[in-house]
Amino acid sequence: MDIAFLLNGENVELTGTAPTTTLLDWLREARGLTGTKEGCNEGDCGACTVIVTDAGGARTLNACILFLPQLHGKAVRTVEGIAGPGGELHPVQQAMIDHHGSQCGFCTPGFIASMACAHLNGDRGFDDALAGNLCRCTGYAPIIRAAQAAAEKPVPGWMRDTAPAVAATQGAGWFAPDGADALAALYAAHPDATLVAGATDVGLWVTKRMRDLGPVIFLNRCTDLQGIE
């Protein structure tokens, strides 16, 4: 097992997966979860938005430039997992229906994910919460009204994910050191490796330029590099 995470509440364990496989491609091609859409494929439009939970809480990320090893030890929830296990709608889904917040529908799954994450976190700053989602049909007003209406509803129990405990920090073609010292040793041993933090640029090397990155060192576990003192 190289990569382990929760997907819509279920354990996923992957072995031998290319380190630059994006979550979007894997969801659609390997899992048949096509609710997460490809729009721009460069992290701008928000059609591919998913909810990712780790020790720091829940936040939204763009699946199109999110590499699978970056999810190791985290919990992912796609639009398919936002409704309840019995098919009951999440408050933001019902509100989007009630307030006519969807027109062509292509952007809707991403908006639902962003709205559900804001709802989970008690975030009422809807303009900021939805700033990463683009809609070319509705003019946004009904979407904002839907978010405001859903904010008064309780958070469904099925939305409270807990990130799984994992130990491994490397897999086939990738490494995830847990600090600057470990990073320095790895980089000395693999000077040709590509360093990846958020992948907002490197992701496009893969999705747009089709580049092979070779070995990859992910920096998201290096907490001592995540602040300035």
Image (cartoon, rainbow, N blue to C red):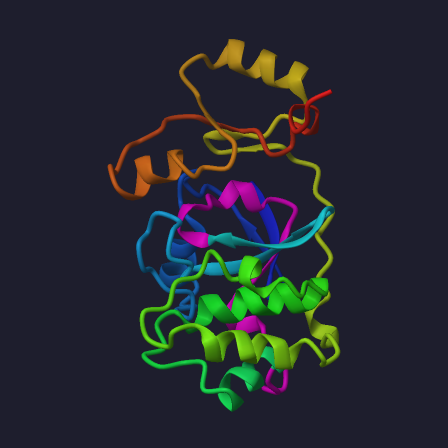
Q: Where is residue 190? Give x, y as percent.
A: 47, 15
73 sits left or right of 200 in the view: right
In the picture, which quadrant includes the C terminus?
A: top right
Q: Where is residue 185? Give x, y as percent.
A: 60, 12
Residue furthest bottom in the image: 98
Examine the rendered structure and indicate whether residue 61 appears above or below residue 106: above
Q: Residue at x 44, y 43 (%)?
A: 17
Q: Nearer the viewer, residue 191 or 140?
A: 140
Residue furthest top in the image: 188
19 sits left or right of 220 in the view: left
Q: Is residue 163 visible?
A: yes
Q: Quadrant of residue 81?
A: bottom right
Q: Where is residue 82? Give x, y as percent.
A: 58, 73
* 132 in magenta: no
* 75 in magenta: yes
In the picture, which quadrant includes the N terminus?
A: top right
Q: Where is residue 131? Give x, y as percent.
A: 49, 57
Q: Quadrant of residue 75?
A: bottom right
Residue furthest left in the image: 209
Q: Nearer the viewer, residue 83 or 111?
A: 111
Q: Residue at x 47, y 80 (%)?
A: 142
Magenta stretch bounds: 63-89
Q: Is residue 84 visible?
A: no
Q: Quadrant of residue 8?
A: bottom right
Q: Residue at x 70, y 37 (%)?
A: 167
